[in-house]
């Protein structure tokens, strides 16, 4: 077709670099997750080790029933933007549930976590007087996109380094509206921000704080309110952003904060205003998931146990992984081709699915396999994974690629 040579040239380059993405075609089945049916290359039944449905809530009976009942009662789509006929009782109830989860006055739903970051940061940066956004160097693509689209100055501070942030805030003019954007759990290395120290610095300089808790909500804190809840810091944060698509097992994103700030974003954020609202059934399912995880620690506790077990067994097997305090276990391969090969062998020969994480998701030379144990992984699943990795480590020339 005309123009295809333009597309193909770039795709060929990606393939040469070993960075071309191949999607595994998987069919999840209620009741058997994390074992799923594989319709692509490799074994027929595979155990998923890289899911962001961290707690298996996407198949929890309360969540499934809430969605099915709401679809039957209200149909599929919302039928409009929130402004033009698309606001349903379930959206309003979910926003109240989210505000309560984070101890905030109000919350606002978006169609994804990506959109919520993009819309909130671009709107804050563009509309607030003399705004400057100070962004952690390892912030997620959705935050970077929002910041790029904000019509304001931006400053990058060193990852998880409150002292660097302090210096950079001190250098700004007194009349600047300073917005400090960072994450709690960083999903690729699994490290966690020194939130309290960052908030101390923000307060010292009169800066707003914006935290992305996408990889923490549902899993950290006594009610699943995230790392900020666990550390008793929610009330010191201006804006908490999260997703409904990971530990809550659905789809959608949100921000929470003061009633005035949420009303401001509701009124000015184009990524909120000009798009169809989430299906009410999704909102009903997400509310059921949040309500369950607020009062049940069973899933969180089981996840912690399985994470600790996998770490200990990897250590015993001599397989190097990043030591971090989160639920994310990255095994560093440091080579895109080897990373993909290893992932293919695991899928084909062992029925283990873990997607290779290559550039541009992570910097070149830091390619990895990222394991996310959850409450539904059995001890036998863990043993099988570790023994497969051990065999491959010995067989392949992987070991010498790893420092
Ligand atoms: N923030 C972070 C840190 C993320 O990792 C992601 C997605 N991986 C998002 C935001 C976007 O969330 P969603 O998947 O709900 O769009």
Image: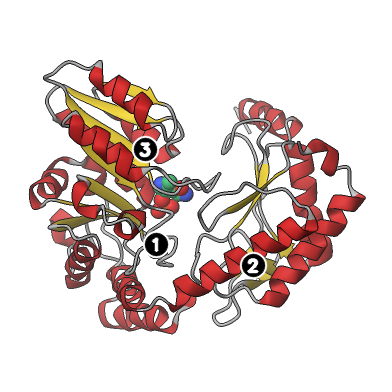
Badge 1 or badge 3: first in the primary sequence: 3
Which image quadrant: the C terminus? top right
Disc 3 under 8 Å from ligand 1? The reply is yes
Say left or right for 239 vs 335. Answer: left
Badge 2 or badge 3: first in the primary sequence: 3
What is the crowding at mark 2: few (fewer than 14 residues within 10 Å), some, or many (at least 20)? some
In the displayed image of the protein, which residue is found farthest to the left? 260
Say left or right for 177 vs 200. Answer: left
Q: Pick whichever, 387 or 146, lies toward us.
A: 387
Q: Is residue 123 above or below residue 26?
A: above
Point out residue 300 in the picture as x, y percentages from the top left corner: 45, 70
Label 2, label 3: how far apart the Cα atoms are: 33 Å
Residue 41 in sight in this render: no
Label 2, label 1: how far apart the Cα atoms are: 18 Å
Badge 2 or badge 1: first in the primary sequence: 1
Q: How many marks?
A: 3
Point out residue 154 in the picture as x, y percentages from the top left corner: 30, 22
Q: Residue at x 42, y 60 (%)?
A: 245
Give residue 289's quadrant in the image. bottom left
Name the residue tied to disc 3.
143
Label 1, label 3: how far apart the Cα atoms are: 22 Å
Q: Is residue 298 above or below residue 235?
A: below
Q: Residue at x 38, y 33 (%)?
A: 145
Q: Secondary structure at mark 3?
A: helix
What is the crowding at mark 1: few (fewer than 14 residues within 10 Å), some, or many (at least 20)? many
Select label 1 or label 3 by which is in front. Answer: 1
Say left or right for 348 vs 150. Answer: right
Name the residue tied to disc 1.
220
Q: Are marks 2 and 1 in contact (CB under 8 Å)?
A: no
Q: Pick whichever, 377 or 282, lies toward us.
A: 377
Residue 261 in sight in this render: yes
Name the residue tied to disc 2.
309
């Amino acid at each position: 077709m005309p123009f295809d040579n333009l597309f193909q040239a770039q795709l060929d380059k990606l393939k040469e670099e070993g960075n071309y993405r191949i999607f595994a075609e998987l069919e999840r089945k209620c009741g058997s997750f994390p074992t799923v049916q594989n319709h692509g290359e490799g074994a027929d039944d595979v155990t998923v080790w890289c899911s962001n449905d961290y707690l298996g809530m996407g198949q929890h009976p309360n969540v499934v029933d809430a969605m099915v009942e709401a679809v039957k009662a209200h149909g599929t789509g919302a039928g409009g933007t929130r402004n033009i006929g698309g606001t349903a009782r379930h959206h309003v109830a979910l926003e109240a549930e989210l505000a309560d989860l984070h101890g905030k006055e109000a919350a606002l739903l978006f169609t994804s976590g990506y959109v919520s970051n993009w819309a909130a940061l671009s709107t804050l940066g563009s509309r607030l007087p003399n705004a400057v956004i100070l962004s952690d160097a390892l912030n997620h693509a959705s935050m970077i996109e929002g910041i790029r689209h904000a019509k304001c100055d931006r400053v990058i501070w060193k990852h998880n380094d409150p002292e660097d942030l302090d210096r950079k805030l001190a250098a700004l003019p007194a009349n600047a509206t300073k917005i400090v954007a960072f994450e709690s759990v960083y999903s690729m290395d699994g490290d966690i921000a020194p939130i309290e120290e960052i908030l101390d610095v923000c307060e010292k300089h009169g800066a707003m704080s914006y935290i992305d808790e996408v990889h923490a909500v549902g899993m950290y804190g006594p009610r699943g309110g995230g790392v900020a809840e666990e550390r008793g810091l929610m009330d010191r944060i201006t804006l908490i952003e999260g997703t409904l698509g990971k530990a809550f097992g659905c789809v959608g994103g949100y921000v929470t904060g003061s009633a005035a700030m949420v009303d401001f974003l509701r009124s000015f954020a184009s990524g909120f205003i000009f798009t169809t609202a989430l299906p009410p059934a999704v909102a009903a399912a997400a509310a059921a998931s949040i309500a369950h995880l607020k009062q049940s620690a069973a899933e969180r506790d089981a996840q912690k146990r399985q994470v600790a077990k996998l770490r200990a067994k990897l250590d015993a097997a001599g397989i190097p992984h990043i030591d971090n305090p989160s639920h994310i276990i990255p095994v560093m391969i440091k080579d895109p081709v080897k990373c993909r090969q290893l992932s293919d062998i695991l899928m084909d020969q062992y029925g283990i699915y873990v997607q290779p994480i290559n550039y541009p998701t992570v910097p070149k030379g830091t390619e990895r396999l990222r394991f996310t144990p959850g409450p539904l992984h059995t001890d036998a699943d863990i043993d099988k994974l570790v023994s497969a990795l051990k065999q491959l480590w010995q067989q392949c020339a992987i070991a010498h690629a790893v420092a």
